[in-house]
Amino acid sequence: MSQVQTLAAAPVAEQTFVQAWSALCKPRITAMVGFAAFVGGLLAAGSGANLLSLAEACGYIGLVGMASSVFNQLLERDTDARMVRTARRPLVTGRVRARDAVWAGALLTAAGVLGLALRFNTLVALLTLATMVAYVLVYTPLKRFSSLNTAVGAIPGAMPPLLGFVAVTGEASGWAWYLFAILFAWQFPHFLAIAWLYREDYARAGLKMLPALPRTEGMAGRQALLYSLALLPVSLLPALRGDAGWLYVAAALLFGVAYTVASALFALRETRSRARAVLIVSLVYLPALYSLTLMDPLVRAFGARGSL
């Protein structure tokens, strides 16, 4: 009996209504989306930021992020049923009906997009909607046909900080593009490590993740290393263009080198422990760098006053 069959045969702990919908909306991912959007918006607004207004914008962006998770699981409930990792998702077990999920996704999308359009600006509303469409209607189905899905999915995946920036300014410039580029490059080692860890699951479901394809041994590690190396100069762009100071540079180098070392070890020998190390470093890298990005202007301002 396969792992999935064993899991399906085992008694399923009854999920509460809240637990089922929480699993469908993925609050941890939504929180990260909101945090990234908040960083972009705060860098756009500077010292005059209206935190309540910015939190509102991030809330609307988060609603559309939740809708993306709902629609993604709707489209993938057949493949989710064949994977050990996802076999107990609420749409697979029937705890949430597909019809209810469609309505929920539509309402979340409408609330988020209309909120952004009415309370902020049309551009951020359209970009947020386009991000969801790209994730749900391009990236999600592409997983069944090509390993290029990771590169395609990295585009909507990198949008949250740019959306936060545009919500405040009505345009994308400077930090909007820096944060987009950093998040775009960051995703590859992160998702390659996940795909390697669950490669048997992906192969069983017929999803074309790179490590799940035949004759691809070693490729996940090598690509993770290449992208972590690319992330180093990308992360230094703000300093090279005069928009960041020494604190940001130190953080970008420290976390970037750690990410590269973890990826290099994974490239040398693909093992579960080394894939998990890449994953752990990636989960530290992004919130730590983004947090220090917000602190950097304060440190520079303090240094400038001290030199007077």
Image: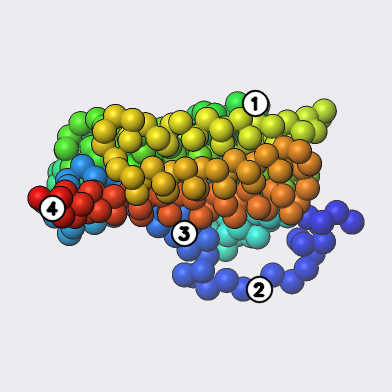
Disc 2 secondary structure class: loop
User: Which amino acid type is marked by label 3?
Assistant: Arg
Left or right: where 172 falls relative to 191:
left
The residue under label 2 is: 13
Q: Is residue 148 visible?
A: yes
Question: Closer to us: mark 1 or mark 2?
Answer: 1
Disc 1 secondary structure class: loop
User: Which amino acid type is marked by label 2?
Assistant: Ala
Question: Which quarter of the rendering shows the N terminus?
Answer: bottom right
Which of the two discs, 3 and 1, labels the residue nearer the N terminus? 3
Question: Closer to us: mark 2 or mark 4?
Answer: 4
Question: Closer to us: mark 4 or mark 3?
Answer: 4
User: Which amino acid type is marked by label 4?
Assistant: Arg
Q: Residue at x 51, y 43 (%)?
A: 256
Q: Are marks 2 and 3 in contact (CB under 8 Å)?
A: no
The residue under label 3 is: 28
Mark 3 nearby-residue class (10 Å; few <14, some 14–19, many ≥20)? few
The residues tagged by marks 2 and 4 sit, at their Cα atoms, a distance apart of 59 Å
The residue under label 4 is: 305
Whole-percent x, y for residue 275 in the image: 69, 48
Q: Residue at x 15, y 50 (%)?
A: 307
Which of the two discs, 2 and 3, labels the residue nearer the N terminus? 2
The residue under label 1 is: 146
The residues tagged by marks 2 and 3 sit, at their Cα atoms, a distance apart of 21 Å
